[in-house]
Image (cartoon, coloured by chain):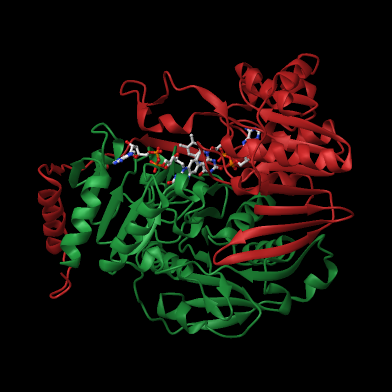
Chain colours: A green, B red
Amino acid sequence: MRDHEDILVFTEFKDGHPLKVGLEILSKARGLADEMSGGLYAMVLTDRADGFDMLFKYGADRVYAGIDESFRYYTGAYFSRMAVSLVENIKPYAFIIGATAMGSMFAPEVAAYLKTGLAAHVIDYKIDHAGNLVQVVPSFGSRVAAEILTPHSRPQMSTVRPGTFELKENLRNGSIVHLDTSELDYIAPRVTPLGFEEVKPEGMPLEDAEVVVVGGGGIETREDWENLKELSRLLNGALGCTRPIVDKGWSDEAHMVGTSGKTIKPKVYIGIAVSGSSHHITGMKDSGLVIAINKDENAPIFDVADIRIVADYKEILPALLSMIKG
Amino acid sequence: MRIACLVKPVPDPEYYNRISIDPVRGILTRAGIPVVMNPTDRHALEEAIRIKEKMGGEVVIFSMAPDDAGGILKDGLAMGADEAYLLSDRAFAGADTLATSYTLAKAIEQFGPFDIILAGNESADGSTSQVPPQVGVWLSMPSLAGIIRMEYGESFRVWCDVEEGRVEYEVTPPVVFAVKRGINTPRYIGIKGIMAAKSKKVSIIRVGDISVDLDRIGLNGSPTRAGRIVVPDIGRKGETITGSPGEIAEGIIEGLRKAGVIKEGMI
Ligand SMILES: Cc1cc2nc3c(=O)[nH]c(=O)nc-3n(C[C@H](O)[C@H](O)[C@H](O)COP(=O)(O)OP(=O)(O)OC[C@H]3O[C@@H](n4cnc5c(N)ncnc54)[C@H](O)[C@@H]3O)c2cc1C
Ligand SMILES: Cc1cc2nc3c(=O)[nH]c(=O)nc-3n(C[C@H](O)[C@H](O)[C@H](O)COP(=O)(O)OP(=O)(O)OC[C@H]3O[C@@H](n4cnc5c(N)ncnc54)[C@H](O)[C@@H]3O)c2cc1C
């Protein structure tokens, strides 16, 4: 182990703002950097010279910023080249990247160029006696948690899904180092971004809601689905779903909770006709109060529920709606 | 177009609640859980076959798995793939995504060249989504993941799902594509396909059949090491509420009130 070990976090930007997941990772990594007496550095590739203050606010000691028109959208060849150069230059102990759509393409590519290990979707970090980073990852949905170590190569790379760590302010008086982008002129990518088509998710974002009502595969009719929407509205909450609802076309992946969807921690989760597969539970298990309604008393959702209701939702929902409406 | 399609056999995801840890040996037990084709890979295969149908060529399956995965590859041949390679050797075992992607890439190189490598966006068991982009690096091909729509002709247009929208890309092969399940509806395997698959071959590839650097495969070639594996206890000691629908509704509202999400005057 060296006498100090630095941590590099890739913080993705969109329209001059950092995505929240990057700030969540900085918040968590600040503690690790302190434990290693090292620096916490943020890497940014953006098309605008804005928004870096936020990185200092959440604990970054230094920002390495590449500013270029070509960073508006992700192009693997450009992004990996920049990251590989920076890593080879500053030799961080760990390199952490948000598991967004973009990060999920970028992180594995960089790890393969550097021939180092990459732990996927870390939910917790520790430092062991040998000075290695212990990276706890889920697998088989959330059924299994495994400690992944990268003992012999550096940096120890990992990804973190949005919503995994809490935001924690820790204002630093940091500096900005500009990255040289001139070497990109020599790259001719065979992948060219043409544009972005916005798809605005309907309703309140799940991750911001105090109450999330989740409708599952047992919801029988579109009318019932609309009633769930009404319930979530009356509770000032959001309506989420499991995969069968996405398959039916009643909702979309931006509202799906689980491995391929969102990780949420609302004060109250209400699962209605949700079986509780491990790929769903992984996204909701850290919720506050968990209420589950399922007609099958053996449904696995009941294992992670605080209030269990073994009943047909078609009987409970009207009663609940009329009581709330008064 | 020569298209390679990556197919991973996985334990059936609808049974993951049954996975446990053998308390004596400390390893995962998946007894009784059937092995199926990774669900997303069925969509990758469907897209591969559609490209072939439109542009001509062939679809070749590559899979790194134990010998008994042959049956799953036969399903892929029955769907319409032309050939399958099963990379199966003790030397490949214990691979993380870097070693897995290296081994797959070396086999693809050996039996290539290919214009398109199609893969699923994530496996049901590991779900790292790391293998496809890493295969791209080993083959010096660009890669895109999260693909929800594709148009093909002279060049390829693909749409990748990102937060709050889609990014459209134009791509010149050779390239690696990882697709999401929403991209298509896989075809059913019919009798004709099953008959046709009888004359198609699943070739088993051992470590000696491909030229690999032994320091890059299996556990040796894996920079990551799995430490402790646990089945976390996320269970809660819940209470069951019973009664008439009205009583149950009252119980729910009581819970919401205690959790502090019902403000004065809301109800
Ligand atoms: C508990 C546990 C945790 C793990 N955590 C990590 C980790 O953090 N980092 C790490 O590097 N490894 C990890 N591994 C190892 C990793 O799961 C394996 O390397 C696995 O073979 C490939 O990764 P994946 O299943 O995540 O594939 P993904 O990258 O999710 O698969 C995407 C697509 O790639 C193709 N593909 C993947 N594997 C194969 C294959 N064997 N044959 C053919 N096509 C394939 C398929 O098209 C698939 O849809 C872990 C394993 C376990 C058991
Ligand atoms: C790689 C991968 C990623 C995945 N990612 C996700 C993800 O992010 N999110 C996700 O949700 N899934 C995901 N899945 C799918 C997951 O494995 C399950 O298939 C899915 O969660 C099942 O949803 P469900 O429980 O709502 O539906 P079902 O399994 O259909 O269960 C319906 C439940 O409703 C109950 N029910 C039926 N009628 C009534 C009634 N009238 N009253 C009360 N109860 C009733 C039934 O008893 C049953 O328990 C993923 C799968 C894979 C392989």
Looking at the figure, which quarter contains the N terminus of chain B?
top right
Residue A158 x %, y %: 51, 53
A13, B71: nearer the viewer: B71
Residue A23 x %, y %: 44, 71
Q: In this view, does A296 lie above or below A204?
A: above
Residue A160 x %, y %: 47, 57
Please report the residue visible at 41 percent of the width from the left and 75 percent of the height from the top.
A59
Q: Is residue B173 above or below residue B84?
A: below
From the viewer's perspective, is A69 left or right of B221?
right
From the viewer's perspective, is A138 left or right of B128?
left
Residue B222 seen in the figure: yes
B142, B25: nearer the viewer: B142
Residue B142 seen in the figure: no
From the viewer's perspective, is A311 left or right of A28?
left
From the viewer's perspective, is B200 left or right of A299?
right
Q: In this view, does A300 lie above or below A6?
A: above
Q: Across the whole image, how many numbered discs are drawn on residues?
A: 0
Q: In this view, does A53 lie above or below A99?
A: below
A148, A251: nearer the viewer: A251
Looking at the figure, which quarter contains the C terminus of chain B?
bottom left
The quarter of the image that holds ligand 2 is: top left
Please report the residue visible at 42 percent of the width from the left and 42 percent of the height from the top.
A279
Residue A274 x %, y %: 34, 43
